Image: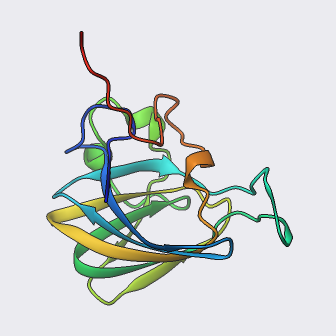
Amino acid sequence: MEVADFGLSNLFAEGAEILPLAETEKVACRIIALFPGQTEPEHWHEESKEIGKSGVIPGKEETLRVITGTLRVFIEGEPNTSESVIPKGKEAYYTCRHQIVLEPCENLTLYPGMKHWFQAGEEGCVFYTISTTAKDGSDPFTDPSVVRKTQIIREK
């Protein structure tokens, strides 16, 4: 399991716990756990610069399905939420303000290029994603401080 703080050093506010179940050139499946109120920063999935066996790899299409808890998904569209859900001081990096709330057994599909971010409800959330090819290391984030792969920095 990857404990991702996205290089922001504030895991309980911005981060995710990610368990990859399967990853091939064409499909990926992951379980993602979020602590209560934990937010996965705003990002999107664009076409890969890599060439796979079948040509250029398109941006990831991802379906989310909640197992337990409540998942708030924010996408572009008519704003319907307040800024109070955005991590303090990060308002400029969370531009999607249209909220969709998913409960257990509900799902939502996100398409390539669709900017989005997630946040768990008060009880936390566990959900899984089934997607086309996952190239998460190259996903762009709105916050330029985000580092996709967790790095452990030891002080000397």
Front position in the image: 113 or 139: 139
Q: Is residue 27 above or below residue 154?
A: below
Extreme residue in the left direction: 123
Q: Quadrant of residue 88?
A: top left
Residue 78, compared with residue 92, is above or below; it is: below
Q: Position of residue 122 (x, y in %)?
A: 13, 63
Residue extending farthest top: 156
Question: Which residue reaches farthest right?
Answer: 55
The residue closer to the viewer here, 70 or 127, is 127
The quarter of the rendered structure image containing the N terminus is: bottom left
Asked if residue 8 lies left or right of residue 144, the reply is left
At horizontal 24% and vertical 14% (from top left) the residue drawn is 155
Is residue 2 visible to the viewer in this orientation of the structure?
yes
Which residue occupies 63% across, 57% down? 45
Residue 106 in the image, given as x and y percentages of width and height = 36, 87
Q: Quadrant of residue 81?
A: bottom left
Residue 82: percent from left, percent from top: 31, 51
Q: Residue at x 24, y 73 (%)?
A: 70
Q: Quadrant of the C terminus?
A: top left
Tell me: 2 left or right of 68: right
User: Measured from the top left, where is residue 54 in percent x and y?
Assistant: 85, 72
| Tally of numbered discs | 0
Residue 63 visible to the viewer: no
Q: Is residue 146 above or below residue 38?
A: above
Residue drawn at x 61%, y 73% is 24
